[in-house]
Image: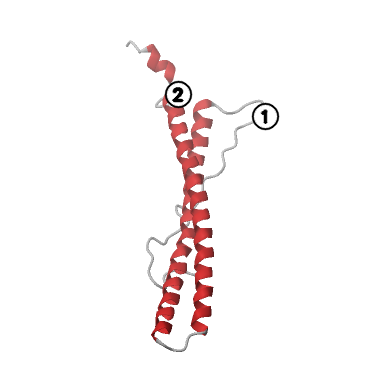
Amino acid sequence: MQTDSSTAADFDGAAGAMPLLAAAELQDHLMTVTNDLERLQRLLDDAGEALSTHFFSASSQTMTLLSNSDGTAASDGLKQIMQDIAAAITALQFQDMATQLIAHTSQRLRNCADQLARDTFGMDDEDGVAVVEIAPLRPNPVTQDEMDAGSIELF
């Protein structure tokens, strides 16, 4: 039986092993996705911080106006604004859950990339065996998948 030498050279001698070039490309994609998720997390953190600041400022100003109101229809409007702000702040709590999910997913992807590198590229050297961080044990840190009133714990 004749074997194609270029294909055989790509395998590391193990049956069913991934070709080196394909493994390198897959690892690169995993690291790119991980970096994108980390950027997304920073963007969400910045947006969440800005929204919190503005919501709490609007809430404070509305409370001041409400305390100075005289019970007119404007007071009812201010009460509605306070309810809307409270609902927006509750919705903002989901930013924290999204951040947890992004961090969890990023950690799992990095673990896959590290395992791939260790197993394919033999990342052991004179300093010892390559250490791959343990993947998260739980499949998902966030079980919430929709936002219903009263369905989250506020913190």
Quadrant into which the C terminus falls: bottom right
Residue 100 seen? no
CA–CA distance in space, label 1 to label 2:
23 Å
Mark 2: which amino acid? Answer: Leu
Q: In this view, does 24 lie above or below 85?
A: above
Q: Where is residue 134 in the image (x, y as percent from the top left)?
A: 55, 44
Q: Which amino acid does label 1 sit on?
A: Asp
Which of 123/35 is in front?
35
Q: In this view, does 6 lie to the left or right of 42?
A: left
Label 2, secondary structure: give it.
helix
- Tell me the crowding category of disc 2: few under 14, some 14 to 19, or many 20 or more residues within 10 angstroms, Cα based: some
List x then y, in percent, for residue 98. Answer: 46, 56
* Image position of 68 with respect to 13: above or below: below
Q: Is residue 155 left or right of residue 3?
A: right
Residue 135 drawn at (x, y percent): 52, 45
State the residue at coordinates (62%, 32%): 129
Which residue position holds label 1?
127
Earlier sequence position, callout 1 versus callout 2: 2
- Graded by Cα atoms within 10 Å as few (under 14), some (14 to 19) or many (20 or more), the crowding at tag 1 reads few
In the image, 46 versus 152, the foreground residue is: 46
Q: Which residue is drawn at 41% across and 87% down?
A: 72
Residue 122 rendering spot, x and y as whole percentages: 55, 26
Q: Report how many numbered discs are placed on residues in the image.
A: 2
Image point (49%, 50%), residue name: 43
Q: Can residue 101 be seen in this view?
A: yes
Q: Give the labeled residue for mark 2.
A: 20
Residue, far right: 127
Taking depth in this image into account, of 108 and 12 the one nearest to the observer is 108
Q: Which of 96 and 49 is in front in this view?
A: 49
